[in-house]
Amino acid sequence: MRSIVGDRLPKFTKEEEALVKGSFHYLGVNYYTGTFARHVRPTNGNVSSSTDKMASLSTVANGVSIGKPTGVSHFNDYPKGLHDLLVYTKEKYRNPTIYILETGMTDGDKETKYAIDDVGRVSFYNGHIRAVHRAMKQGVNVKGFFAWSLLDNFEWASGYTLRFGICYIDYKNNLTRIPKKSAFWFKDFLNAK
């Protein structure tokens, strides 16, 4: 990392290192999809925060998709990726407390009657919660799981064109809120004995 980031990496005094070492209370994870990564070097010699990873990411490699496509090209349903990330984090970083702060899927911007019947989102959450449960059975210290999102909302790079919510927002009719099938699935899941 030091050879890649160079002068952009902050320098710490020994006192500052002592203050921050082991000082976090939990690790927050945002997980939406798995990707294949291929090593690439910057072609123009300009290394920056956007090229530091020196990787090309894709949900398809050699014609094979990672996980189940969701209808949005850069989001695939891949619970195994979340499971493997959690187990890797446990093994590599001495089993920190982990909260899944964001996870969810979008199915694009569909008409109301199609958007509320979101069986793909139900499958996504069912698979990802099961993946977290398997990781916990392997000793991973997961303390929370937060679905993204309760409501369809404004997504930074996509505006209102992607819908992550378990409640549909009808932007054309006074922002009416309609629970999707996934909202009822969550209710049943959380109330199960």
Image (cartoon, rainbow, N blue to C red):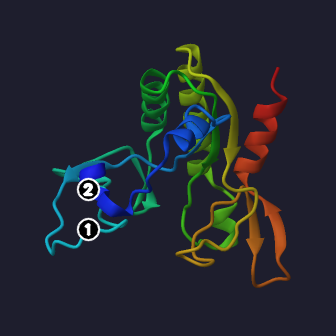
- Asked which secondary structure carries label 2, the reply is helix
Q: Could you say which quadrant of the image residue 54 lies in? A: bottom left
Marks 2 & 1, CB-CB < 8 Å contact: yes
Could you tell me residue 14's position as x and y percent? Answer: 50, 39
For the point 38% across and 43% down, the residue is: 67
Looking at the picture, tell me which residue is in the foreground, 47 or 181.
Answer: 47
Q: Amino acid at mark 2?
A: Ile
Residue 4, numbered circle: 2
Q: Badge 1 is on which residue?
A: 47
The mark that comes first in sequence, 2 or 1, is 2
**Is residue 56 visible in the rendered structure shown here?**
no
Number of other residues with Cα within 10 Å of mark 2, as a class: few under 14, some 14 to 19, many 20 or more: some
Left or right of 174, for residue 41: left
Compared to residue 1, the image places residue 143 above or below, namely: above
Report the amino acid beneath label 1.
Val
Tell me if residue 53 comes above or below residue 45 in the rendering. Answer: above
Front residue of 184 and 140: 140
Q: Is residue 111 above or below residue 28?
A: below
**Is 136 situated left or right of 42 in this image?**
right
Distance CA(mark 2)–CA(mark 1) = 8 Å
Q: Position of residue 110 (x, y in %)?
A: 60, 71
